[in-house]
Image (cartoon, rainbow, N blue to C red):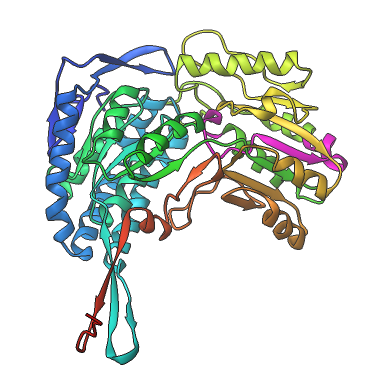
Amino acid sequence: MRAQPTASHFINGKYVEDTAGAPIDVIYAATGEKIAQVHSATPAIVDQAITTAKAAQKGWAKLSGMERGRVLRRAADIIRDRNRELSELETLDTGKPLQETLVADASSGADALEYFGGLAASITGEHIPLAGGDWVYTKRIPLGVCVGIGAWNYPTQIACWKGAPALACGNSMVFKPSETTPLCALKIAEILIEAGAPAGLFNVVQGLGDVGAALVTDPRVDKVSLTGSAPTGKKVYAAAAAQMKHVTMELGGKSPLIIFDDANLEDAVSGALLGNFYSTGQVCSNGTRVFVQKGIKEAFLKRLAERVAKIRIGDPMDEAVQMGPMASKSQLEIVRGFLKTGVDEGAKLVCGGKVIEGKGFFIEPTVFADVTDGMTIAREEIFGPVMSVLDFDTEEEVIARANDSDLGLAGGVFTQDITRAHRVIDELEAGTCYINTYNDAPVEAPFGGVKGSGVGRENSKAAVEHYSQLKTVYVKMGPVDSPY
């Protein structure tokens, strides 16, 4: 598949270019080479995208849920038919290994389109009978024009996670991918048109923060959905709130993964590996604070180091490779800084800890032990393949320490005591939790955080509530009494 898209933007059912916008180079993270270029959206492009989205939404909302769902399900089928080429594009866009993208990216986007396509016809209200024969009915109505702002770690998936529920509920969407990974969302827009979506329903525009700000603050936009960091989320949330827009904020985390000494050791190590090194550690829900009860600590670290040593790093287009590069040079440098800070603050380096010199933005999967709660690597989101292992003695102690964070996206527990598992999960201040597993994200289940990790939920029936609103209608069946 060619990396260079037909044009930078996809608006009103076709590719659109405006070279007056600032150029954005697309860098292949595995080699550091430029593989494509797009242009940031000018004010004229932004206006065109919102204008066409607003026009398309009116007719789309008048279709039945069954008709809308049929389009989304067709798009899901097309994505599955083209999974290989879309996965290769995802790898070019992000640097993630093909072994991963073949099963976790385009296919996940297809799941979202299929799920919400099937759900669209069931989006209904209720009948409320009242005394005297009067009654009330409610209906779920679209919000209007939705803006989706994506992150660079899952460009295909995020476009679908936001687009599918928005479209199922009768909205339109203008989607802005991350400037680091601008390619994949264009293909989703193209496929939706092929599946029968009206022109203008799902538009894609490129750009940096200024383009995002223009979209968020445009008075024609009714809803903003962001996937990004907590600091960015606060700014976008405030800007949207100033105009009373609906929002979904899916933000970062510094999530705890608690391993009790009765846990199945191999499973616990597997969970910690998945929760720290999948996608080269670039997953918002990662369990980067791994609390290990002291009775199992040494055995856990020994087995962890053995398995980390076997991780295959290299060319992400080689399906035998298990870990690719960081998505960008800037993110690599951020992680490099955290590695140095971890050593400087006294954490014990178990394995890894180095940037791999040469082409591309590769870094060794890294494990720090003897990490304390106050260390920088235990407090701040790193967004790279860096695991911090902390000791604990008692259940009460680890719950308090796990909750000592401004963030609350995810949390996990490994134990063979099912009563304790549920008891601890109940106490964790996190929106998405796992028992004896980590980082599963089926579209049927709600995903999102509490505290500084955001508001609203992605996926599941819960997402319908965030992409629609209730209209209540009171029906009087008799004469109207009035004191006047």
Range of magenta residues? 278-300
Picture residue at 70% right of the left edge, 49% below the top: 413
Picture residue at 48% right of the left edge, 56% below the top: 445
Depth check, front residue: 171 or 164: 171
Quadrant for the C terminus in the image: bottom left
Q: Is residue 360 above or below residue 418?
A: above
**Residue 223: x and y, percent?**
31, 45
Q: Is residue 373 magenta?
A: no
Depth check, front residue: 289 or 211: 211
Q: Is residue 284 magenta?
A: yes
**Residue 476: x and y, percent?**
23, 83
Regarding residue 261, the answer to whether it shows in the image is no
Judge left or right: residue 260 versus residue 335.
right
Q: Is residue 472 above or below residue 405?
A: below
Picture residue at 69% right of the left edge, 29% below the top: 378
Q: Quadrant of residue 200?
A: top left
**Residue 424: x and y, percent?**
73, 54
Depth check, front residue: 33 or 159: 159
Q: Is residue 169 above or below residue 301?
A: below
Q: Is residue 102 above or below residue 387?
A: below
Number of numbered callouts drawn: 0
* Residue farthest bottom in this picture: 132
**Residue 138: x and y, percent?**
29, 71
Quadrant for the N terminus in the image: top left
Q: Quadrant of residue 85?
A: top left
